[in-house]
């Protein structure tokens, strides 16, 4: 009995073991991004918080968000309104999710009240000073020459704070009304959000430096985050009973629409970052950052945003040696193809950035979520390129949830997004730190170390991937 059944038992055993091993290999491959996220999400968030002053991090003044701890080559030991507002939106999202991080938000509000009132080279409280892009860590004005003003800051700060205040209203309405939003007429407000919204009303159409602090003009990023401030500002003001301001914000938003649509170039096949740009393609990661931070007019799943994503990937896949040596599907993505800033010097060659690589992943995941919540995907001639990149069998048409084309496209988008996360995984430090850039030739970290905004961008892409169903 025993001798007769032994060979069969062991054959079944071997077969079963093989099955387990093969299955495990597939699961390990599929889950390597999952486990990278679960290992590194907390690390990235802890690193982000190390760059914010708090009662447990007294090396930095309370409520101050530094761009990076690097004090030379490059010196990023400053507070930028843009970087800080984006970073704080991550902590506000935490607060909305689980009530955590309230003290970071409260401390940051205190600092913003002070910064708004500091006379600086861009002006004073009601005379343009809110457009000043960066301040010293001790919250004094930075007075050396700089690309100023940058008009995205007040809009980004208002967006972050309105998201918080809308929730916090039921906890402490008195605080919201006394510190964040009063109904004083334009120019007379003493509250942070109202002052920022009024700044957007009066200055959104004027030219300013772009988010990369290099060129003056009207920029997609700056305009679209301002549009969000006006749309959400109208709803917020209404909620607080200020229908006069709500009307002004709504009208301002409407008056921005022609400008916003004008950034789309059917001829180029992508959204151009700066109106009338000279000597550059206008292809820019700022556009995708704008689409994510303000998913109005062009959402991540819109044909214009998908076409811009494809144009970005196509431009960068052949540009950097590390990309040329890589078969994809993910590639290192830079700010814009003509960039010459290497993280220290501007007369050099540009590199891929963690922010921009994460942004492409995030856009792809956000688009995927848009498709799944609509239970439908529309592939147009304009967006076909990115669909083909994700799934080679893609063709123009409308695909409903349940069809095999729909499933193939969704699976292809997830794989494509994961490809960009793998690039982050490969070039970040083993211990989970991220600088600003990674070298175009050898992939090593470059530029400001532990860039706070890099952590926010990586966390944003991880969150967007977790949200895909
Ligand atoms: C530092 C800025 O932050 C960076 O964006 C820019 O490229 C260089 N200065 C050159 O203006
Ligand atoms: C340079 C980037 O171009 C700019 O967007 C950023 O605000 C600063 N560095 C600080 O991180």
Image (spheres, helix red, strand yellow):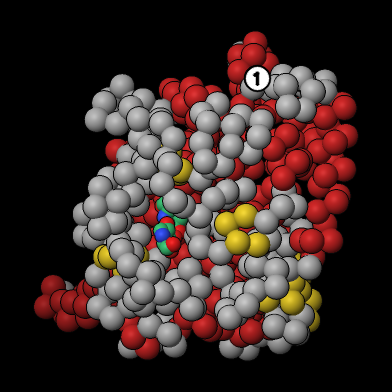
Q: Is residue 452 left or right of residue 251?
A: left
Taking depth in this image into account, of 5 and 40 the one nearest to the observer is 40
Report crowding for label 1: few under 14, some 14 to 19, many 20 or more residues within 10 A (C-alpha): some
Q: Write down the residue under mark 1.
A: 190
Q: Residue 11: where, in percent of width, then height? A: 22, 80
Taking depth in this image into account, of 216 and 418 the one nearest to the observer is 216
Residue drawn at the location 33% of the way across and 82% of the way down: 322
Vertical order, 445 against 243 (above or below) = below
- Which quadrant would the C terminus be assigned to in this image? bottom right
Q: Determine whether the beta carbon of the residue marked 1 sits less than 8 angstroms from the nearest atom of ligand 2.
A: no
* Figure quadrant, ligand 1: bottom left
Residue drawn at the location 57% of the way across and 79% of the way down: 280
Q: Is residue 423 left or right of residue 430?
A: right
Q: Is residue 201 in view?
A: yes
- Which quadrant would the N terminus be assigned to in this image? bottom left
Q: Residue 195: where, in percent of width, then height? A: 67, 29
Vertical order, 285 against 38 (above or below) = below
Hey, which quadrant is residue 369 in on the image? bottom right
Residue drawn at the location 26% of the way across and 26% of the way down: 58
Q: Is residue 73 left or right of residue 95?
A: left
Q: Secondary structure at mark 1?
A: loop
Q: Residue 252: where, in percent of width, then height? A: 83, 44
Q: Is residue 295 in view?
A: no
């Amino acid at each position: 009995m025993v001798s007769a059944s032994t060979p069969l038992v062991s054959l079944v055993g071997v077969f079963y073991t093989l099955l387990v091993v093969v299955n495990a290999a597939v699961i390990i491959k599929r889950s390597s991004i999952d486990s990278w996220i679960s290992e590194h999400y907390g690390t990235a968030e802890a690193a982000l918080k190390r760059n914010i002053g708090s009662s447990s991090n007294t090396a930095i003044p309370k409520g101050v968000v530094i761009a990076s701890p690097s004090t030379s080559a490059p010196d990023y030991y400053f507070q930028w309104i843009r970087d800080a507002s984006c970073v704080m939106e991550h902590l506000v999202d935490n607060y909305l999710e689980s009530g955590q991080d309230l003290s970071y938000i409260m401390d940051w509000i205190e600092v913003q009240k002070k910064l708004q009132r500091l006379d600086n080279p861009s002006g004073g409280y009601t005379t343009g000073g809110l457009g000043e892009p960066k301040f010293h860590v001790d919250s004094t004005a930075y007075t050396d020459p700089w690309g100023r003003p940058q008009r995205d800051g007040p809009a980004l700060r208002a967006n972050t704070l309105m998201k918080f205040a809308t929730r916090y209203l039921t906890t402490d309405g008195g605080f919201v009304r006394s510190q964040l939003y009063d109904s004083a007429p334009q120019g007379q407000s003493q509250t942070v959000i109202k002052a920022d919204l009024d700044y957007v009303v009066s200055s959104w159409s004027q030219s300013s430096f772009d988010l990369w602090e290099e060129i003056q003009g009207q920029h997609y990023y700056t305009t679209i985050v301002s549009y969000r401030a006006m749309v959400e500002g109208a709803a917020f003001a209404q909620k607080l009973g200020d229908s006069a301001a709500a009307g002004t914000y709504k009208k301002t938003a409407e008056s921005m629409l022609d400008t916003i649509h004008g950034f789309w170039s059917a001829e180029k096949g992508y959204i151009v970052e700066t109106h009338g740009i000279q000597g550059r393609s206008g292809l820019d990661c700022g556009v995708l950052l704008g689409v994510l931070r303000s998913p109005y007019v062009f959402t991540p799943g819109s044909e214009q945003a998908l076409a811009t994503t494809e144009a970005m990937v196509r431009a960068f896949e052949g540009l950097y040696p590390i990309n040329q040596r890589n078969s994809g599907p993910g590639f290192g993505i830079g700010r814009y193809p003509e960039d010459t800033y290497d993280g220290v010097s501007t007369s050099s060659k540009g590199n891929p950035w963690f922010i921009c690589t994460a942004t492409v992943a995030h856009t792809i995941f956000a688009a995927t979520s848009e498709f799944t919540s609509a239970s439908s995907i529309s592939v147009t001639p304009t967006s076909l390129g990115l669909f083909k990149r994700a799934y080679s069998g893609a063709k123009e048409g409308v695909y409903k949830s349940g069809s095999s084309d729909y499933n193939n496209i969704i699976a292809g988008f997830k794989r494509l997004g994961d490809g960009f996360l793998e690039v982050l995984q490969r070039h970040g430090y083993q211990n989970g730190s991220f600088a600003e850039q990674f070298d175009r030739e050898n992939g090593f970290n470059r530029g400001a170390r532990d860039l706070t905004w890099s952590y926010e961008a990586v966390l944003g892409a991880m969150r967007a991937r977790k949200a895909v169903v």
